[in-house]
Image (spheres, grey):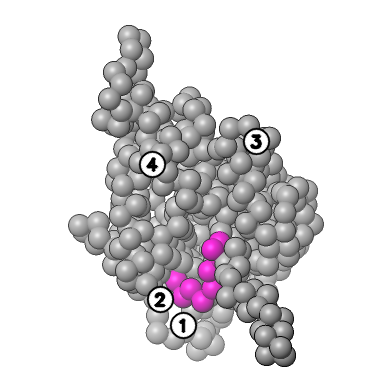
């Protein structure tokens, strides 16, 4: 009797140990390289260009990313004619990446969910027509060609609707959350399983409204991307702690200048640069390798985190010694002209000599802690002048001359700039 009793007592524990935790399917650990790409909006060619830029696919669109993880943060459809091609590309790459030890994570954005729920406000005529072969039902007079095929394709048993319903809205890879909009402090639940089920419930008839339609839901919320940081700082801290993350990466809100945006001291990265032709075709992706976050642009790589180290900077002052109003320039980031990029990172930067104020351009504004040199538009040019290096913002036209220490005191950067980081 004793062995039998012991076995019965151990059965629940053994069953619990063998059963995988539901949370694990939305959490991925030990990933060496992650590439995140934001809103595609039917522009499959732009998507392919970015994936090639990131070294994930070859000239024949085949996966060459090895064990890397690709995250597409939602909004593949609408506003472009080639949504179906984008679906097919990622469906195939999912399989190819898995065989190579990597993963492809297409996440749900508000536009995937809108199409599955029958909200077709942003579907283009060409996009409708591309789905025409998905239904034998003929489109009626006055209906766009492909309307019935589109509905069939996004249905629960349709080719793309069935596929989309297997994907979440939020995942965590290592210590970073990836999603379309943002996890507001009001999001229900304490696990990603609960959050994703809250989103999925809007795809089941008869369920109460969930995260796919809630303005504060993870596919709609824009607070971290648009609002003053002070408004959400405490809430962001709480949400990140709740879901065991250090930062959040999101799309959904296109940038004004086609560049990735770092907010909340690096705890929020907004990666929607307007990739599609509809938004200006600003190609970009985010690469994460451990604590190193890098923006990938056609013209090169730009480190985002950690911020390149420089000597402490003083507040800019005019010739009479008074502090100058407005934001100073940010020497570690931005776009530098030609080979001066290497120079800027290799010199020892000392106290600014003078600053000239000018009219502020939209997108330039004060942000960051006191003592930082920052120009928010990220469009810096540099040139050698008799007084040192002159830094100039191409958009807000602010200038600053930074004197150089003697050549013998300057410490050159060992090994030069990494490949692709020269501008």
Q: Position of residue 199 (x, y in %)?
A: 61, 44
Residue contact between numbered discs 2 and 3, judged by CB atoms under 8 Å: no
Numbered circle sitting on residue 207: 3
Which residue is drawn at the image coordinates 36% and 24% (left, top)?
148
Taking depth in this image into account, of 267 and 185 the one nearest to the observer is: 185
Which residue is drawn at the image coordinates 42% and 43% (left, top)?
162
Q: Mark 1 or 3, which is nearer the eye? A: 3
Name the residue beneath numbered marker 2: 417
Residue contact between numbered discs 4 and 2, judged by CB atoms under 8 Å: no
Disc nearer the start of the sequence (4/2): 4
Name the residue beneath numbered marker 1: 413
What is the crowding at mark 2: few (fewer than 14 residues within 10 Å), some, or many (at least 20)? some
Disc nearer the start of the sequence (1/4): 4
**Disc 4 from disc 2: Cα separation:** 44 Å
User: Quick check: 297 left or right of 49?
Assistant: right
Which residue is drawn at the image coordinates 27% and 25% (left, top)?
136
Q: Mark 2 or 3, which is nearer the eye? A: 3
Q: Classify residue 12 by image quadrant.
A: bottom right
* Residue 301 against residue 31 in the figure, above or below: above
């Amino acid at each position: 009797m004793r062995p039998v009793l012991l076995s019965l007592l151990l059965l629940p524990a053994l069953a619990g140990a063998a059963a995988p935790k539901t949370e694990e399917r939305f959490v991925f650990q030990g990933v060496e390289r992650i590439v995140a790409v934001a809103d595609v909006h039917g522009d499959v060619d732009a998507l392919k260009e970015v994936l090639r830029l990131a070294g994930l696919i070859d000239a024949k669109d085949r996966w060459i990313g090895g064990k890397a993880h690709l995250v597409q943060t939602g909004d593949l459809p609408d506003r472009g004619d080639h949504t179906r091609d984008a679906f097919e590309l990622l469906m195939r790459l999912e399989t190819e990446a898995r065989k190579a030890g990597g993963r492809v994570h297409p996440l749900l954005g508000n536009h995937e969910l809108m199409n599955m729920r029958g909200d077709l406000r942003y579907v283009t005529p060409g996009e409708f027509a591309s789905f025409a072969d998905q239904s034998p039902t003929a489109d009626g007079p006055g209906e766009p060609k492909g309307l019935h095929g589109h509905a069939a394709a996004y249905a629960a048993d349709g080719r793309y609707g069935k596929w989309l319903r297997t994907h979440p809205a939020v995942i965590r890879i290592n210590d970073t959350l990836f999603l379309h909009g943002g996890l507001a402090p009001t999001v229900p639940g304490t696990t990603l399983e609960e959050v994703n089920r809250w989103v999925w419930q809007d795809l089941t008839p008869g369920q109460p409204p969930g995260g796919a339609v809630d303005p504060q839901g993870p596919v709609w919320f824009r607070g971290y991307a648009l609002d003053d940081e002070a408004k959400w700082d405490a809430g962001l801290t709480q949400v990140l702690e709740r879901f065991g993350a250090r930062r959040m990466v999101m799309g959904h809100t296109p940038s004004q200048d086609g560049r990735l945006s770092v907010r909340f001291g690096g705890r929020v990265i907004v990666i929607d640069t307007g990739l599609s032709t509809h938004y200006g075709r600003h190609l970009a992706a985010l690469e994460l390798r451990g604590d190193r976050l890098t923006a990938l642009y056609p013209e090169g790589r730009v480190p985002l985190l950690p911020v390149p180290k420089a000597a402490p900077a003083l507040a800019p002052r005019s010739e009479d010694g008074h502090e100058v109003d407005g934001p100073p320039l940010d020497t570690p980031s931005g776009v530098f002209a030609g080979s001066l990029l290497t120079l800027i990172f290799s010199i020892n930067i000392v106290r600014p000599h003078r600053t000239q104020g000018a009219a502020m351009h939209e997108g330039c504004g004060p942000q960051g802690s006191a003592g930082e040199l920052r120009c928010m538009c990220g469009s810096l040019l540099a040139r050698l002048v008799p007084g040192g290096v002159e830094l100039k913002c191409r958009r807000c036209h602010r200038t600053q001359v930074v004197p150089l220490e003697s050549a013998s005191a300057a410490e050159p950067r060992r090994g030069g700039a990494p490949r692709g980081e020269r501008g």
